[in-house]
Image (spheres, rainbow, N blue to C red):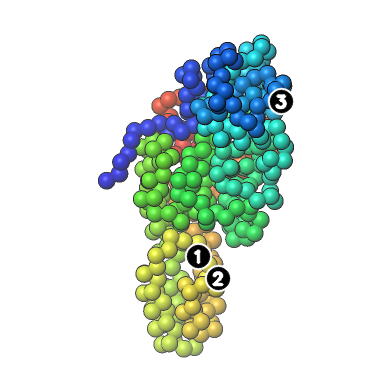
Amino acid sequence: MLALAPLAPQQLTQIAFRDGAAALMSSKPGGIAPISSNDVLKQDPDLWYDDGNVVLCTDTQSFRVHRSILAARSTYFKRYFQEHGMFPDHEIRLPEPGEELKKLILGIYDPSFFEGPPHKADFRDLIVFTRLGFKYGVDHLARRALEHLSLAFPTSLERWDDNNAATFDRRAISAADAVEALVVLRAVRATWLLPTLFYSCYREHSLTRIMDAPAWQEMSHERQKFVVRGYEDHVDALHGSLGFFGRLPTGECKTHAVCEKVVKEWYVETLTWKTRHPLWKMTAKKDKAKSLEKTCKNCRWWAKLYHVEERKALWDLLPKMYGFIRTWEGFQEKEKRALADITAFIEESNDKAGSTPKDSKEKPWTQDGMD
Ligand SMILES: [Zn+2]
């Protein structure tokens, strides 16, 4: 029994301001209150400038900062101050968790607070800087976050296999963070990251854990079904990755009876594998391929070749398997375009999010962005 709440797919990102205006991609202002209402206890000691002229408030913390600095780095604040003028000290109430807004402000004030690759990154920070970087139009933070993510969640098999440039361990991401990242990256339309993020999520976590993630409830029923189907196809793909057994022993085998026995035992053993890693590598020094050494030279050579071919075919199939319309080539093009001009990409994503008709939110995961 799945506990599927009928929630809108982008609900996570459509947090309401206290005045009720829709938020994530909107340029609508938060509520305005006189500065005297600010609770002294909430003043953040690290970000409370004596000469600040605007106070940003969250439920837990308040920050007295400078309008000119916010406006210079954030298209959201620039537009906000243009629309509301530069009248004396006031508070802007924002719906973000206090610690996340603090990171955004630190990232705005200090260019080295959040560096791009090759600096190491914390995955949670990447979610925060992607979400808030897009929402508040802080280009350098959004771009750096996407650069980190693109190294770990690449769009080619070569880059997937050669993961040395990655700035965080994609295998150490919790189910909660992975599901939240799926929702956030979908909302900002950084969709080229999704196929390999889905792969990692399905590889590392059971469906139960995925459904226990808080962000699961932020997905529409349709999208939840889509994730479940993707998971099932992913698990089935492991059996698809074992097609080479049917082609062994090879015709060039010199010890047919021996190789046939080994291959058969090896195949039976694979039926007990608990892994959800259909892109497993036969060449890796893992116990998965130890039987290979017991076959003849010819069978070994052909088994490796068949497996490489089948592995490549599975990689090519991944986007379609998870329900995407785009191919890897399409995603590569999108990745290149987005990272080449992040300002335009953020504008475009925010425009689309703001103009998405309500009924399209019930459509499957991929369709509203035509990916
Ligand atoms: Zn053989």
Tell me the tag on residue 69.
3
Mark 3 residue CB less than 8 A from any atom of ligand 1: no
**Residue 243, how many percent across, how many down?**
43, 68
Crowding at mark 1 (Cα within 10 Å: few <14, some 14-19, many 20+) = some
Tell me if 83 is positioned left or right of 223 in this view.
Answer: right
Q: Amino acid at mark 3?
A: Ile
Q: Amino acid at mark 2?
A: Ala
Look at the numbered disc 3 and give the secondary structure of its residue.
Answer: helix
Proximity of marks 2 and 1: CB atoms separated by less than 8 Å: yes
Tell me the tag on residue 353.
none
| Residue 363 figure quarter | top left
Distance from label 3 to label 2 (Cα)? Answer: 51 Å
**Residue 136, how many percent across, how many down?**
61, 28
Q: Residue furthest left?
A: 1
Whether residue 272 is visible here, answered yes or no, is yes
Q: Residue at x 40, y 58 (%)?
A: 235
Crowding at mark 2 (Cα within 10 Å: few <14, some 14-19, many 20+) = few
Identify which residue, 58 or 201, lies in the foreground.
Answer: 58
Proximity of marks 1 and 3: CB atoms separated by less than 8 Å: no
